[in-house]
Image (tube, rainbow, N blue to C red):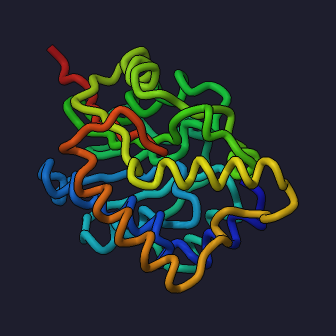
Amino acid sequence: METSALALEALCEADHWWFRGRRRLLGRLIHELGLESAGSVLDVGCGTGANLRLLSDLGLPSVKGLDVNDAAIRFCREKGLGEIERGDLQRMPFADESFDLVLATDVLEHVTEDVRAVEEIHRVLKPGATALLTVPAFPELWCRQDIIAHHHRRYRREPFVELLRSGGLRVDRSFYFNTLLFAPIWLARQVLLAFPGLVENEISINTRWLNAVLARIFALDVDLAPHIEAGFGVSILAVAHRPAAP
């Protein structure tokens, strides 16, 4: 991701409706899956610390962050968000079977070899341990934001599930989320594609009242998404695990 985009994300991730809603979804799943006592947790592609903030609030005892970007690591350390290491998701600097929980949220789209990345997540998970993964959905939503973030692709649910399986993970469930805002986001991105100089970064399209409204809508969305399992959404979430040894 471009440094200017990282700096903007670092400033707003604590309160921005998108990051707050995603933390709400992940936190609920961690609670429902009984993972609050997970002994060792890895946040892959930790960025500027949005998930590390959640993991800290949950009081998980041993949390590490991993990112390949020096600026992202610096932002996390400045916020005091725990132990961060520099490394590539496709070649992680951790021993086999190291973690009880791995979060890989909006990171697989950044790497050139996503199958290799999933194999690495499988490798560092303990047998039976869980991974929570999210990716951006639908190539039709491709926009300048994907370019700024250095994305290689967006996914559909079925190919995403097959990707995880091909990397050795067993997928327990998967669903689209950010469904309620799908149409306005699609429309806004069409406008931004038509007028490329209008806005440099989508995150900057925000005001206090707009953030409050979107936060309420997105909170409702992430509460409903695991139950209604709509056929579309701006993002996909998968709950997967490394099969236990026979």
Q: Position of residue 227 (x, y in %)?
A: 18, 44
User: What's the residue at 36%, 65% (across, down)?
Assistant: 217
Please tell me whether residue 21 is drawn above or below residue 112 in the rendered image.
below
Q: Is residue 94 left or right of residue 222?
A: right
Q: Is residue 82 visible?
A: no
Q: Position of residue 10 (x, y in %)?
A: 61, 73
- Residue 134 lies in what quarter of the image? top left
User: What's the residue at 48%, 57% (across, down)?
Assistant: 65
Please tell me whether residue 50 is drawn above or below residue 115 in the rendered image.
below
Q: Quadrant of the C terminus?
A: top left
Q: Residue furthest bottom?
A: 208
Q: Is residue 136 left or right of residue 57?
A: right
Q: Nearer the viewer, residue 192 or 132?
A: 192
User: What's the residue at 65%, 50% (across, down)?
Assistant: 68
- Residue 242 lies in what quarter of the image? top left
Q: Nearer the viewer, residue 9 or 98?
A: 9
Please tell me whether residue 112 is drawn above or below residue 38 in the rendered image.
above
Please tell me whether residue 105 is drawn above or below residue 121 in the rendered image.
below
Q: Position of residue 2 (x, y in %)?
A: 77, 57
Q: Nearer the viewer, residue 200 or 244?
A: 200
User: What's the residue at 67%, 72% (across, down)?
Assistant: 204
